[in-house]
Amino acid sequence: MRDTVMSMTPAKVATQDSLLAARDLCFHAGGKRLIDKVSVVIPEGRRTLVMGANGAGKSLLLRLLHGLLPATSGQILWQGAAPDDRARRTQAMVFQRPVMLRRSVLANLNFALSVHGVRGAERAEQAARALDMAGLSDLARHPARVLSGGEQQRLALARALICQPRLLFLDEPTSSLDPASTQRIEDLINAAHGRGVTIVMITHDMGQARRMGDEVIFLHAGQVAESGPIDQVLGHPKSEAARAWTQGRLYTSSTF
Amino acid sequence: MFSFGDIMAEALALILNWDRNLSEIVVLSLRVTLTAVLLSCLIGLPLGALVGAFRFPGRAVVTVVLNALMGLPPVVVGLFVYLMLSASGLFGPLQLLYTPAAMIIAQTILVTPIVAALTKQVVEDLHGEYAEQFASMGLRAYQRVTALLWDARYSLMTVALAGFGRAVAEVGAVLIVGGNINHVTRVMTTTIALETSKGNLELALALGVLLLVIALLVNAVVMALRASAVRAAYA
Amino acid sequence: MLRRHLFSLAAGAALALGLSGTVQAQDQFIVVQSTTSTQNSGLFDHLLPIFQDKTGIEVRVVAVGTGQAINNAMNGDGDVLFVHAKASEEKFVAEGHGLQRSDVMYNDFILVGPSADPAGIAGTKDIAAALTKIAEVGAPFASRGDDSGTHKAELKLWKEAGVDAAAASGGWYRETGSGMGATLNTGTAMGAYVLTDRATWISFGNKGEYQIAVEGDNRLFNQYGIILVNPEKHANVKAEAGQMFIDWILSTEGQQAIADYKIDGQQLFFPNAEG
């Protein structure tokens, strides 16, 4: 039984199956404890969802795990050791609003490849394949900024995946998209997962959670309220916060 | 009584009777200024991008200094360069005084702060947008700088044109370090100064009109390049 | 990729173009520090081609104010000094900056003024009396105020007239701190009397309603001198070529060339080299 995702037992945190783990992570800013002694484990090859109400610290946690922000205290472990630059480069992130370079769709992909040292014919080939997979081949030469929201997010996703990361972070990638675009994005994410990419995704959508989750980390007020396999957390929530959420009740960080 | 019509007529006559002398002056003006702008961009673009994209101690001071240097008086720069290049100066042995090279040096000093300060602002604004994405991709410093400079290319074109405008219009620096020597270091602005001092005001103004026309043409060419690049992007 | 190559090519070409001017054929050339008034009279445009044809030496004239010319020569930024400020020139040689001073030519100063002639001096032959009258009436007078040969001559004349013009600076006595042309422009615009050299006046293009008020007084005599910058003080001085130019200017041929220079049939400079 791989129930190693319990935050209550930090000692058991970093096991061989965990790609990424955090131990007693804290982030303080403006006199507030925005992330308060959070310990999590991200198992390799699985789809882990991070959920919770607004202000619970989900985006913050993702950024801390990805190394975009320095933690106030605590440890982050990549395969049991402190992550270095090379380790970080095997991770990628897709943001809620896609960040498009002021260039063509193709150039955006080429940029990511160049950063990883891929050039020439091989770069052209990989870029073409990625465009194809994302269904953007027709738009290759268009300036990325004139694409629709859904197309841009697909490009952002393709760009994140093009260098074959081991772990992909996604911060509410479809919250501003229509159902059709959402479907396409989810398909791409699942395809990546099928190729072995570990997924860590924030979502607000119950339906999406059910479709896209293997494991869930439920945050409340900067702490882990609950975590475990999705059926368990969403089906039989133990914590107040998770229960309120699954029941569709409105609440804030200060409610409980 | 000066008549605007007379001046324009003189300007037209100037263009219609275009002679070798005029060619010499116009070509030298463009050569000196364009070279100076190019050198200023080579120095100023990366400098501005570095200051714009990175945090480091003293950044605020550097910004203030760069912005202030945009207001360097050309005649002061000319004096400074003259003192450096004079036979009695530090770089006297190079024998650069009273040559186009000296004029290029002086104008480069004048234009580089403009390019750097404006680039810094452009890059800073852009970087705000891209910071997280770049951090996520683990970009090294030089990759960040080149990515930002390329993405800001249209704004930077305008920055370069601002530098060009400043250089092509100045007379104080090139007069002192160039010496306004006939057939050697005489450019449009120093010719205008010379004709003015001879009391040939209409000719001076006509030359001024010509200078404006040339500046307009340069700007138009750059804008055309930009438009065709944009169109090509949709091809 | 292609764009990047094109860019480097363009940059390279531009740089080469820009700096190529400095590596001009090192055909002999000398730099002469002279004054704007001499330049503006057009004398050099007439003289120098003759010299270049004969010797192949290109003469590059840097025309600035007298003070600046002397200063430049002191810094070694010229091979020959050719100005019209005898006292300063003699000091220049005495202090070892130049080898020897020789008289070359003279022209004369004239006092020009508005045709309305507020000081009522038009036609006078006595410059001192005219200046005294100007001070009395408080008629506007525009001075170079820039330590140039013309300015120094002007100050000498005020002294002769016994007038303390400086005391009236800002009032009827206006110091422009500029070259001859600029001062004439300013002076004619404000209806002021101006002391100018004849050569500049004849070729000046903005005379408006002005006329010559006073001329012919032999105190208005303006002597030009030529000096070789001391090669011992500055190794870069082209002593041989510079001396060739000086020798030519002082030779019969050079002196004749000076006399031949006319505008509207009027001779502007009168050669008076010794021997």
Image (cartoon, coloured by chain):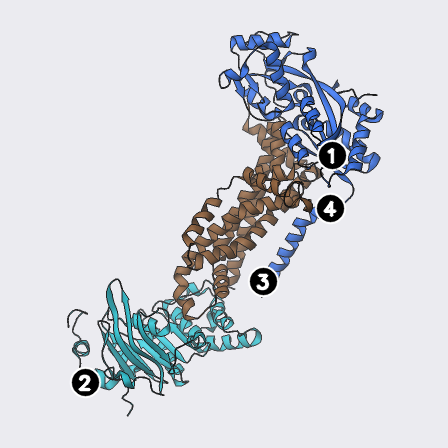
Chain colours: A cyan, B brown, C blue
Cβ–Cβ below 8 Å for labels 2 and 4?
Answer: no
**Chain letter for the residue marked with disc 4 in the picture:** C
Q: Which mark is residue A236?
A: 2
Residue at (72% x, 23% y) in the render: C224
Q: Which residue is mark 4?
A: C24
Query: Position of C273 compared to C10: left or right?
Result: right
Q: Is residue C218 above or below residue A131?
A: above
Instruction: Tell me which numbered mark, 1 or 3, is placed earlier along the sequence.
Output: 3
Q: What is the secondary structure assignment of the residue under circle 4?
A: loop
Q: Nearer the viewer, residue B19 or C19?
A: C19
Q: Residues within 10 Å of mark 2 (few under 14, many from 20)?
A: few
**Chain letter for the residue marked with disc 1 in the picture:** C
Cβ–Cβ below 8 Å for labels 1 and 3?
Answer: no
**Chain letter for the residue marked with disc 3 in the picture:** C
**Chain letter for the residue marked with disc 2 in the picture:** A
Q: Nearer the viewer, mark 4 or mark 3?
A: 4
Q: Amino acid at mark 2?
A: His
Q: Looking at the rendering, which quadrant does residue C195 occupy? A: top right
Q: Residues within 10 Å of mark 4 (few under 14, many from 20)?
A: few
Q: Which residue is mark 1?
A: C230
Q: Furthest-front residue in view?
A: C95
Q: Amino acid at mark 3?
A: Arg
Q: CA distance from mark 2 to mark 4?
A: 88 Å
Q: Looking at the rendering, which quadrant does residue B191 occupy? A: top right
Q: CA distance from mark 4 to mark 3?
A: 31 Å
Q: Nearer the viewer, mark 2 or mark 1?
A: 1
Asked if badge 2 and badge 4 are on a common chain, one would say no
Q: Which mark is residue C4?
A: 3
Q: Furthest-bottom residue in view?
A: A1
Q: Nearer the viewer, mark 2 or mark 4?
A: 4
Q: Nearer the viewer, residue C204 or A166?
A: A166
Q: CA distance from mark 3 to mark 2?
A: 60 Å
